[in-house]
Image (spheres, helix red, strand yellow):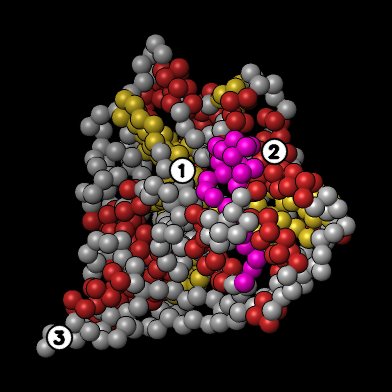
Amino acid sequence: MATQRVVHNPMGYPPKVAGKALAPRLDTLDGRTVYLVDCRFDDSDILLKSVQAWFAEHMPSVKAIYKPINNVYTRDDPTTWQEIKDKGAAAIIGVGH
Amino acid sequence: MSIDLKYGIPTVCLHTDMFTTVTKSVVRMNGAPRMRQVYLPHPVMGKTPAEIRAYVYGASPVSGRPVMQEVVEGLTRALDEEERKGLTFERSTPRLCEPASEDALRQLFLDNHWTDNLPIVLPTVERVAEMLKHTRRKPDDVVGHHTATHFREVWQCTVEQVAVNAVMAGARPEYFPVILAIAATGVSARGSSTSSMASMVVVNGPVRKELNMNAGTGAMGPYNHANATIGRAFGLLSQNLQGGSLPGDTYMGSMGNALAYASPTFAENEERSPFEPLHVQHGYRPDQSVVSVFAGMRHMAFTLGLRPGHWREQVRNMMRGMDPNESPTFLLDPIAARLFQDIGGLKTKQDLIGWICENGRMPAGEYWDYQLVQNYLYPRATFGEEPLAGKLRAAPDEMVRLWTPEQVNVVVVGGETNGYWRIAGARLAGSACVDDWR
């Protein structure tokens, strides 16, 4: 039988992951304001404007507001999140790669 | 994620299907594995508006269902119990692996993606203990925190865990304080960026001589034990102490980067340099031993010497070829460094950095049309951040500066076999004093 060796595990310590609830969903989008949040990454503006066009064509009662974030996608943008919370009902964010 | 989880706004995230695995992994590690995500075809970049419209109006390549139907349902379908609670879990890292034969352990390390796929030195209890003798720090002292990308969870590491990876890399115990200092910067040599970054370490001060590090001929190549194994240790500790570097999950570099095998690590040739050392440039004393860790290393420009006739135009051409989103680090053989003094008339490092910033330019229209500038600098400019906002006001044909002096670094390295020199796209991401880790 080959010699048994004892070696260390090379991994670090992961953090505890705390469960987070999703925000309650809406009953309907009709008549509601939906923010289309542009992460400003790799032509995401064209994508979000296509989503805006889809709403205009298929769900015209939805007010779909195109909203580019205020900074680079790698940075948090509490100003924009607060604006959406104050003025909107839902968000579609893209393109996150 | 914070818009939904923190601000309570029902949100759907749009991704391309290339990122299915990683986005599902990221939301799980953030405690919300059922985050509403919808997948489009890949890529978005470079597609015409008509093609992107077809993505939006078409079916998801992941589910086969209409994209916008999934989006609307994602905002309106009531949450189930799992979505209302999220997922809480803990993972542990056992200190030791189960005893096994050497062959079995080598296979275990490969199977768990704990190596760089080159042979390693097994981190036996005895070898790790020997490594730990070369620092006054306790084995369970926390060294720092690492993550593959800012979207992912942050892992913590101890002195002992850094020692384990140092052993695996083949480093000698006397190198350990340098490796600890590198780990303490928190910079990862295994960043997950799709751009396939590598890292680089410059070592300054007395520790270079103590460890017989190479600053001369072949310093950036595989010709010195300390340079080679410290750099390799940086790579291994990065991937293992941040929770992995697995393509498609914790590593998304599209092409990969051969520089990541070595994480080029070398000493600055302070003795032959006509300029102040890198660590002194950044506020350390000459007698301190310091590691300077550079990130974002993907590309280099290269030439030989400087000639009186057209050196300015030639260096400008080199700078025009660099990625304008990344900072430049000039890597000069001592001969080349002296040519910048003698032919260029740039007597100090500050003179050289000033010249670089004055002459590294391109037309504003061209600058702002770079995809990386659009992704990473344009949003900051529109938010009013200077000097970027000023460049945004420039006319399309106005020659705008690429870099500020704070972004530019100059390192002298090489053995004077000739006056070759390079510009590396690499930014100084962190530094640490080795003496704090002895």
Q: SS for tag 3?
A: loop
User: Residue A1's x, y, as percent?
Assistant: 11, 88
Residue B229 left/right relative to A3? right
Q: Can you tell which mark lies on residue A30?
A: none
- Give the residue number, with chain letter if any, for mark 3: A3
Residue beneath the point at 56% across and 33% down: B370
Residue B308 left/right relative to A89? left
**Residue bounds of the magenta highlight:** B34-55
- Give the residue number, with chain letter if any, for mark 1: B426
Residue B327 left/right relative to B73? left
Q: Residues within 10 Å of mark 2 (few under 14, many from 20)?
A: many
Question: For the image shown, how many numbered marks are present on the structure?
Answer: 3
B317 and B183: which is toward the camera: B317
User: Residue A24's x, y, as percent?
Assistant: 77, 72
User: Residue B141's x, y, as percent?
Assistant: 47, 77
Residue A15 left/right relative to B335? right
Q: Earlier in the sequence, mark 1 or mark 2?
A: 2
Q: Is residue B424 above or below residue B189?
A: above
B430 and A81: which is toward the camera: A81
Give the quadrant of residue B423.
top left
Give the quadrant of residue B64.
bottom right
